[in-house]
Image: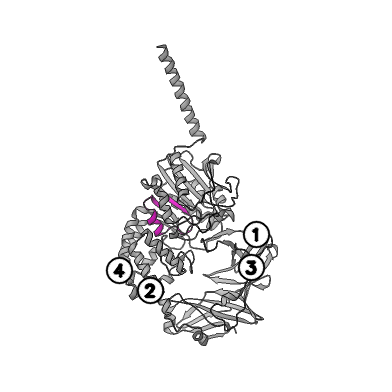
Amino acid sequence: MEMKGKNAVTTVIVLLILVAYFAVSTFTGNGNQDRARTIMIYMSGSDLESKAGAATSDINAIIPNEVDLDDLNIILYTGGSSKWHNDLVGNTENAIYELTSDGFKKKKSYSQLNMSVSETLSSFINYAHDNYKSEKYDLIIWDHGGAWQGAVSDDFNKGDYLELSEFKEALDNTPFKDTKLESILFKTCLNSSYEVSVALSKYAKYLIGSEEVTFAGNIVYAMDFLNYVEEETDPVSMGKMYAESYYQNTVVRGNLANRKVMAFSVIDLSKIDKLSEELSNFFNGIDINENYEDISRVRENLYQFGGTKVSSYDVVDAYYLIDELSSYSSYDSEKVKEAFNEVVVNCYSTDETTSKCLSIFFPFNGKEKSKEYGLKVYKDLAFNDDYYNFINGFTFKQSQAEARASMISLNEGHFTNNIAIKDKVLSLILTDDEKKDILDIKYHIFKKDDNNYKLIKTGDNTTIDGNNLLIDLSGKYLKINDEYVNLNYLDEEYTVSGYVEEEKVDLHDDMVTYVLSLNNEITNTFMDLGEDVVGSILLDYKDYNYLYFNNSTYSFNKSFDKDWQSSLKRDYKVVNKNNLNINFVDLDNEDYYCMLEIRDLNNTVHYTRLERIK
């Protein structure tokens, strides 16, 4: 009896100690917690962080005392950037952090790993699932995105991308092969696409993302929506919260309202198969051979996300593609639209005449290698065999038309003979066939200086009155400190390319685009990210001492060939930010010339000879 009494007392003491331990563990935030919901953030900082501190800005936007840490685990995995702009994340390692009441605390570190391979993503997901038991799990992908091409780049592995096949491979090696995530949120560009939705429908209930390019930088952020997510917050509400956060803290804060369409969606992945079925019926009902020219015009006139002209992504809004092609299909387009609306359960768009928040790949403007790659991805991943047959057939028809060079009337001699410039207004009389087959027109204005021609403006504000193409050449031109620079006026926006620097330096790859207003002000500055990724980093030019503005020249003569751009002599106007004088001016009486750049139905570009502006 005495022995039994001692055992009972010992048992009670042990139980009390265990209860006390778990109570302290639960309420102090020490150790891994079993909470109702775990949100996993896979953050590849890439050049968004190394060049502009964009990842740091979003990390800092997550405020511990505002997050519901009683019910939520927020687990962060970092890597992929050569320079982190904070004291938390190291430059030479990958690491996992848990959000506590005292901020993010490092839980595990690794040697530097490639963020753009499936093994890295799956190892993080498995760690979070094994160490943080929850009823619900969400995955956030933070970095660059590229529609059907996938997402996630890495400073240390340039040119590599986590392709959709690799996303599938990563998730197949996690418990979410069988049990679905609540949501996958892409804090990226362009990943609200039909192809991404099909690829990931097996692994998540909802997909949240942007149809268009998104902006990042150290002066804007969007991840503060996590401060308001609760255990019971459904994915549709979370998607709305993310979109609203982006709008307020990036679009409004960054003065970006007129820069790009904002188009965030919440996609019900359980309905994507029905949309695929309706898309198959619709595109099977279109005769490409009979309607090729009309389809080309429809495709050209649709807004292209990731760049309205040449882009390696070649994506357009799926809803408006169906709407514009409805008269060419024998299948009822309303059935497709109904299926589309069941898939897109929320669309936060700043221009609903352009975007219904879900894109689809339609190769048209991209380079041949990009088209071939996109078609291969479509075939290999079997997104939709019938739609693949449609775009593959269209691309073949387009290549045939280009090879035939069928638009014989569009040649430099013809246009030169029909161009007239009077009182700074250019007039070009078009034949009916020419008018029918022109897709778009740009003009280039040059100032003659000895044997060189300085490009001072490229624009696309042209009008056609009947068969008469008209361009008012008396519009605005830009001088920086009394010297012309290469102004672009495209898509109703004035821009100049250049650099921002702390000190005067030689030219390099990190170019910026200045956006200007007619109030003689720079309204935005974006760092361009090159050909490997889409998008730009938002900067404040006032943070830099020297501003470079492109004022390059060309050495061709009036009888130049189509390779006139190869005669480029690159140069820049360099000014100190404290001595910046911006002026929009009209043309004076010096020697100015105009050239037209005309793209036809077959995507062939034609140039006219230089014509003197009178």
The residue tagged 3 is 549
How many angstroms separate mark 4 from mark 2 (CA)? 17 Å
* In the rendered image, the vertical position of residue 197 relative to residue 593, given as above or below: above
Q: Which residue is under mark 1? A: 542
Sequence order check: which comes first, mark 4 or mark 3?
Answer: 4
Image position of 114 (left or right of 379): right
Q: Gap between marks 1 and 2, in whole Å?
A: 50 Å
For disc 4, the neighbor class at 10 Å (few under 14, some 14 to 19, many from 20) is some
Which label sits on residue 331? none
Give the residue drawn at x 57%, y 53%.
49
Q: Secondary structure at mark 1?
A: helix
Query: Magenta segment, which residues?
Result: 184-206
User: Which residue is disc 2 drawn over?
Assistant: 397
> Which is nearer the N-term, disc 1 or disc 3?
1
- Name the amino acid, label 4: Gly
Asked whether the residues under the numbered discs 4 and 3 touch, taking CB atoms below 8 Å apart as contact, a structural biologist would say no
Quarter of the image where the C terminus is located? bottom right
Q: Quadrant of residue 488?
A: bottom right
Q: Say which amino acid is labelled 3.
A: Phe
Earlier sequence position, callout 1 versus callout 2:
2
Q: Is residue 429 left or right of residue 277?
A: right
Q: Of the numbered discs in the image, which one, if any, rests on residue 285?
A: 4
Total marks placed: 4
- Disc 2 crowd rating (10 Å Cα; few below 14, some 14-19, many 20+) is some
The quadrant in which the N terminus is found is top left
Residue 549 visible from this viewpoint: yes
Specify which label sits upstream in the sequence, 4 or 2: 4
Camera-nearest label, 1 or 2: 2
**Which residue is at the front of the view, 539 or 338?**
539
